Image: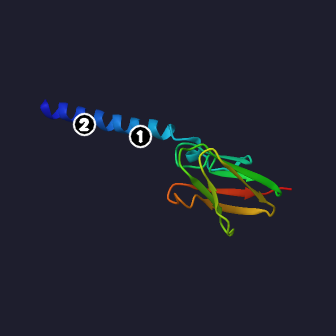
Amino acid sequence: MPERGYRLKRFLCVGVVFLECGLLAGCAPATQRASQPVRTSQVDLPQSYQFVPASIEVRPGSVVTWTNHDNFTHSVEVQCQTEVHMLRPGQTTQIRFDQPGTYPYVCTLHTRNMRGTVVVSGA
C-alpha cells in the first residue's frame, strides 16, 4: 500500500508541473507567441528589455518610430546601416524604409535579448 501512495503522489506532482508549464506558456507576451509580423509603424521599448512588437510589416516609404518607455538607454541599429540610434528614456527615433525586404535590427547595448525585424512589402 505505501508503494501505491508514493506512485499516486508522484503522478500528481508530475501532472501539476505539466499544468504549470502549460499555463506559463499561455501567459507569454504576445510578441513571443506571434510568428507573423504585425502591420504597424510603431515599436515600443517597454520596461522589459524587448521590442514590442518585435516583428513588424510596413509598406515601402514608411517611417517606423521606436519609442523608449524603459528606464534605461537603448538603441536601434538596422542591419546594413551604419547609424546607431541611441534612445534615452522617453526618447523616440524614426527610420524610413523605402525598399522591399526584411531588415533585422538590434539594440546594440542589449544584443542578447533585444532583436527585431522590419518587413517591407506591398505597394
Instruction: Give the structural element (helix, strand or loop) at label 1.
Output: helix
Instruction: Give the structural element (helix, strand or loop) at label 2.
Output: helix
Task: Identify which residue, 71 or 23, lies in the foreground.
Answer: 71
Q: Is residue 59 visible?
A: no
For disc 1, the marked residue is 21
Quarter of the figure with residue 121: bottom right
The N terminus lies in which quarter of the figure? Answer: top left
Residue 1, placed above or below residue 118:
above
Q: Which x, y percent locates residue 59?
A: 81, 54
Q: Is residue 8 left or right of residue 87?
A: left
Q: Is residue 13 left or right of residue 71?
A: left
Residue 46, placed above or below residue 102:
above
Q: Which x, y percent locates residue 90?
A: 63, 44
Label 2, residues with CA under 10 Å away: few <14, some 14-19, many ≥20: few
Question: What residue occupies the far right of the structure in this picture?
Answer: 123
Amino acid residing under circle 2? Arg
Label 1, residues with CA under 10 Å away: few <14, some 14-19, many ≥20: few
Identify the residue at horizontal 80%, vertical 54% (top origin): 62
Q: Is residue 110 left or right of residue 42?
A: left
Residue 58, placed above or below residue 84:
above
Q: What colour-coding does the image apply?
A: rainbow
Q: Which x, y percent locates residue 104?
A: 64, 61
The C terminus lies in which quarter of the figure? Answer: bottom right
Comes first in the chain, label 1 or label 2: 2
Amino acid residing under circle 1? Cys
For disc 2, the marked residue is 10
Identify the residue at horizontal 74%, vertical 46% (top origin): 40
Task: Identify which residue, 119 or 62, lies in the foreground.
Answer: 62
